[in-house]
Every structure is written in structure tokens, then in C-alpha cells.
Image: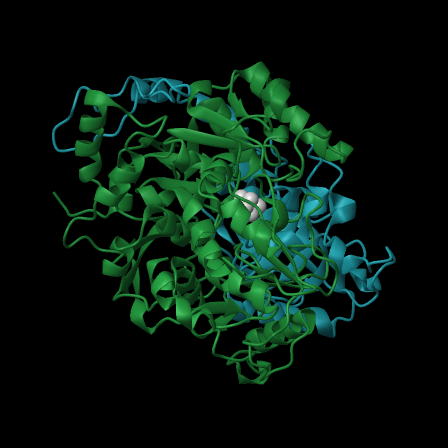
Amino acid sequence: MIEPFVRHTGAVAALPRADVDTDQIIPKQFLKRVERTGFGPALFSDWRFRPDGSLNPEFELNQPEAEGATILLTGANFGCGSSREHAVWALREYGFRAILAPSFADIFYANCCQNGVLAVRLRPEEIAEVLRRHAAAGGDYRLSIDLETQRVADGRGFAAAFPIEAYRKEMLLHGLDEIGRTLLEEERIAAFERGTRNVERGTEGRISVPRSDFRVPRLGEGS
Amino acid sequence: MTPRTLFEKVWDAHVVHRFPEGPALLYVDLHLVHEVTSPQAFAGLRQAGRRVRRPELTVATVDHNVPTGDRALPIEDAVAARQLDALAENARDFGVELFDLQSPNQGIVHVIGPELGLTQPGMVIVCGDSHTSTHGAFGALALGIGTSEVEHVLATQCLVWSKPRTMEARVTGAPLPGVTAKDLILALIGRIGTAGATGHVIEYTGDAIRALSMEQRMTVCNMSIEAGARAGMIGPDDTTFAYLAGRPRAPTGAAWTHAVEAWQELRTDPGAAYDSRVTLDAAGVAPQVTWGTSPGMVTDITGSVPDPADFPSEDERRAAARALEYMGLAPGTSLAGLPIDRVFLGSCTNARIEDLRAAARVVRGRRVAAGVRALVVPGSQQVRAQAEREGLDRVFREAGFEWRNAGCSMCLGMNADILKSGERCASTSNRNFEGRQGRGGRTHLMSPPMAAAAAVAGRLVDVREWAWEREGELAAS
Ligand code: SF4
């Protein structure tokens, strides 16, 4: 079960950088845990903390006005690089429910959805506008995000619509168990596995790839 | 029948179901598993009382977190050891084959899949690792997934995925001597940017791609993710079949003949349309070196560090300025001649046997420069054994390189192999992100011959000039 996301209003923290990769979001030294929890304190670790372990006062999320923020406002291609879902676990545990950016890396976007974190794509000029408003508000800037109507608004004149695929929207709104949902298609999966498309039986006009009786042979078996 | 691309053929052959809300349920032929992104997925299965649907289509190895020193010694890092133990226990409980630290087949997951012949054309292959794109070199649709998706695939053998767009990257002409597949892909990323192929699957075409060996094709497909693409593909051909023939897990006998017939269909039909296209003239590519903190921040070794002020957008100016500060570089500095402290020959991009051979050719009879620490970490124990049969380990050792056991090692620095803050490294890996190889470490990505030459020179050099007396040999690499 993922945590549902229907609507959310919260304080905004800005990290106006492009291409923030998942190595920054959660550095590799924290990837040794076998749980899904415990990553929040390590979020942006190399940026948040100085080498001696003290807080880096210059980092955006360490500004007093970023405290308690639940919405992260950032640059293009957020979450690029490594597929580590730990990045989303860290963001969620730190307190973020939604991330607004002009674009996201594909794997990261999918990982967000799996964890009830809403990745909101706005147009670059809309992100720029929100950044301006955030800066002008001097630390007191909140946004409301409504997934049902697919709208973001600040209650002070800014409003924008965002796209999301119907499947992901459903999943987030209802906090679906995706595996459970897929298993409802058991018949279809089994039928596919019985498959007509395998090399031994051949097919007409379709691509044949080893399929239903394809099995990874144990070492030495093949030769 | 409408002409289809290679990607569309593989996609169509694997659609189990189309959800009315958009995405497809795609069947997975091979699921590769490693220790870092799988423990939470197995825990999820346990919690829900689920099993692995097709354990025989699932193969696990340990790579990210493993020590590359003496395998007889116990693992010092207790947390890392716990993660390795967790995978062993999960593999045992769920009936999944595991190549552990003691296995002669252990190695980086993207090196051992092809090497064992597990990776085959036309398959859908997934792994909880973004460089799964490597396997696309065989005409497979291979992509990295997150841990929740790993759990989903374990439980259902299917992946939910919305059909991506397609991009053709056509590379024509013949690269000059000293220019490798790594340079081609770096040049391409430099051109389209690190998000240039987001939402797309890239198909690499053109005579320059056809002329590449399988190992070089893997280098190219490996870095598709660095251009934002979740997968990169190359249509299988005789080069592919020759590589696969006789591999331990490849089909044999009649099954092999049938398989090759089927695989021959896996090519883009004439007239099939891609959503976008990009072209690159291989003859115009020089050896590439990154100067910044993303693989797109790359230029010719004959070039110099750019001035952030020259970038067109505010975002790029800011990113370039940050990168230069992190890298400790001033605008206008020429890249050739930049002193380095460390050299890393390794990773799923460039630690296969051909890579080691190419680097050894440069190194043979020479010495690593004083003050430089250089590391060779073969991609797999098989690669290591092969290199030792060929005497390459001696070449490296005599030159002053450390010769290690297989693993990801300093590509991501999860084990003890890391850069110290401020150290500059010539690396054959795929990511030069801030802190990737160790906090404060400065990574310059390049090809194996370039990294090998840097080790000997103690600074970045243009391998074409530097090894001019060996040009014939370089051309053969
Ligand atoms: S070698 Fe590097 S890029 Fe490849 S799988 Fe390992 S950590 Fe990832």
C-alpha cells in the first residue's frame, strides 16, 4: 500500500538547481541499510553538513524559513542518475510530500509515485514564477496542491495546472497496492506465460523470442 | 503491416495487458538483482506473504558493496556485511540463484549478464540499477527500476510501464585512432545533454555503431541513462550472435538455430518512424574528457575549461560556475596537462576484457607516475581470470597499478575505495557527480586508454599524441 495523496497544503522550500542527482539526494554511504526507513537524516547529507558534521548554514534547506517545509521547489531534471529509491524514502522521511520542478528523471518520477510523493511538473516559466514569489514572501510561502483537479495554487493569485497520467493519479489518490492490482490480471499473465510466441513452436509474422519455456539454465547446462 | 522500430517489436512482444488508464503490463524475461536495491523488496514480499513468481528468471549477484581486496579476509564493514548476508538469505529463501563473493562468476551485474549469455536479444530485462541500459547492446529492452518496482517484478514477473518515445542516435563514419566507444557516447551526451533523451528509448544506428564490438556497444548503451534515456538499444547482428555463441546460458543446438532466426527479425523496419533523431559524425570526435560534475559537461581533450559566462541560460551559467568551484578549475584552463592524483580503471562502462587490453597496451613497459595511485578493478571475476591468463595483471602490476577483485568499487565508492577530498581522478566510470567517488573527490570521465595514459603521465594527456609511437596499436584498440 502506498500512502495516498489527495490534496496537500504546506510550506515551500526552494532548491533552485538543475540536474540534482540522486547521489546528492542520498549519498552512497547511506545505502547499506536493508530497511526502507532511516534515510531522512541523511537527505542531501554532503550539502547539509560540513565535513566535520556541523550544519552548513549556506545550504538552502538549512535556512530558517525552510524549516518544516513539505513542498520542495527545484530545477529541471531533478532526480537524475542512480535508480536508488532511497532518494525518495529520504525526501519523504525528511518531510516532503510533493516536489515541483520543470522536469524529472524517469526512474525518480516512477519511484516518487510508488511512495506517495507527488512529483509535479510545471512549465519552466511557472517554476520561475513560483521561485520569485517564494523569494519575495521571505520565508512565509505556502502552496496548495490538489491532485484531483491537478492544480497548484498559492492563494495569492498564482495558480497552475499540471499533467499526470491517469494510472498514476488513481494509484496516488487511492493509495493502491500496485502488486495487488497487477495480480488481479493473473489470468492474463498466466496466459502470456503459456504463450504462443516461443521459438520452439514458431509463429507467423510475429517476433519470436524464447518465452514460456525459456528458463535460465543452471551453469554448465547450456554447453 | 506498418513498419516498426526495434523497440516497438520488443515492446509489442511483451505486452501482457494494457491498462485502460494508459500504461502496459510488460512481461520480464530476466530480472537481475543485487544487494543494494533488493533487501527492501524481499522484505515487502515476506510481509505480504508473497513468493517470487519466476525464480528461474531471476539471477542475483553482489557487486556494489563488496570489498575488492583479499576475498579470504572477513568483511570489515559490518553494515555492508549485513546487506550481503541479507541477499544470501533472500536468495536461499526465495529460490533465486546467487553468484556470491566466492563464486568465480561474481561481478558487476551488467558485466556478468552478457558474459554468461543470460542477456539475449529481444528480451525485456530489468534490474534495480540505472545502468541496466547496458544490456540493450544485444537488442534487448533493458531498463533500470526502483526498489518498489523490483518487488513488483519479483511478485508478478511484470513491470508497469507507459510506452516511452523513441529516439534514433545515428553515428556514422569511422572514429580516428585513439577514439573509442566511450568517446562517442560522451560526445553524444555532450551534444544532447543529460536530459536530452528523458522519456525516450534510444536506438543507436549507423555504420559506426555496426563496426563496434559487443563490448564497445555495451559501453555506448551503458551510458544511455546519462543522456536521460531509461534504455538504449542496438539491433542484433552477426557480431551479437558471435559473441553469444557458446556462452554458458545461451541456447544450444536446435534451440540456438531457432533463436538466431528469431533474433534476425529484431531490426527496425525500413520506413519506421522515431519520435526524434540525432546524428553524430564519428570521424569528427576527439578523445573526450569531462570538466564538470555531470557527464554532459564534457569536451575534447584538446579543449579547455569553459567560462560559465558563455553559457546561454541562467541555469547553465549557475550550474557551470558551481561545477568549476567543486572541481577546483578556472575557466580557460586547458584540460591536457591537468595533474591528477588517482586513476580508476573499472565500472560496468569500461571494465570488460577489451577495456583492460586497451589500457594495458598503453601501460605496457611504462610506470605509473610518482604520486599517482592507480587501481584496476575488473568488471567480473571472469574478466579478471581472463586478464590473468593473458598476463595483463602483470602489465598493470609491473607498472604500479593495484590489481583488484571484481566489483563496483570506486565507481560509486560504497566500499573502502574512495577519493579523498580534493583528489583529482581520471576515471573510466560513468558518473562525475559531486562526491560520487568520495566526498570532495574530483572525477574526470574518459576512455580506458586515456585513463591509462593519464596514470603514466600523472596528468591528463591526449592519448593520440602522447602515444604517437604506438598509434598502430591504439588503432587496434
Ligand atoms: S559499476 Fe558503477 S554504474 Fe555500474 S552498476 Fe556498479 S555502481 Fe552502478
Could you tell me residue A33's position as x and y percent? 71, 35
Could you tell me residue B386's position as x and y percent? 45, 38
The quadrant in which the C terminus of chain A is found is top left
Q: Is residue B122 left or right of residue B288?
A: left
Residue drawn where x is 47% and y is 42% of the image: B387
Q: Is residue A115 left or right of residue B195?
A: right
Which chain does the cyan colour mark? A
Q: Is residue B77 shown above or below B253?
A: below
* Whether residue A145 is visible: no
Residue drawn where x is 49% and y is 29% of the image: B105
Tell me how many marks there are: 0
Could you tell me residue A151's position as x and y percent? 55, 55
Residue drawn where x is 64% and y is 46% of the image: A87
* Whether residue B342 is visible: yes
In the rendered image of this protein, which colour is used for chain B? green
Could you tell me residue B228's position as x and y percent? 46, 56
Q: Is residue A183 left or right of residue B273?
A: right
The quadrant in which the N terminus of chain A is found is top right
Q: Nearer the viewer, residue B373 or B59?
A: B373
Q: Is residue B116 shown above or below B390?
A: above
Q: Is residue B171 shown above or below A194?
A: below
Quadrant of residue B287 within the rendered picture: bottom left
Q: Nearer the viewer, residue A74 or A167?
A: A74
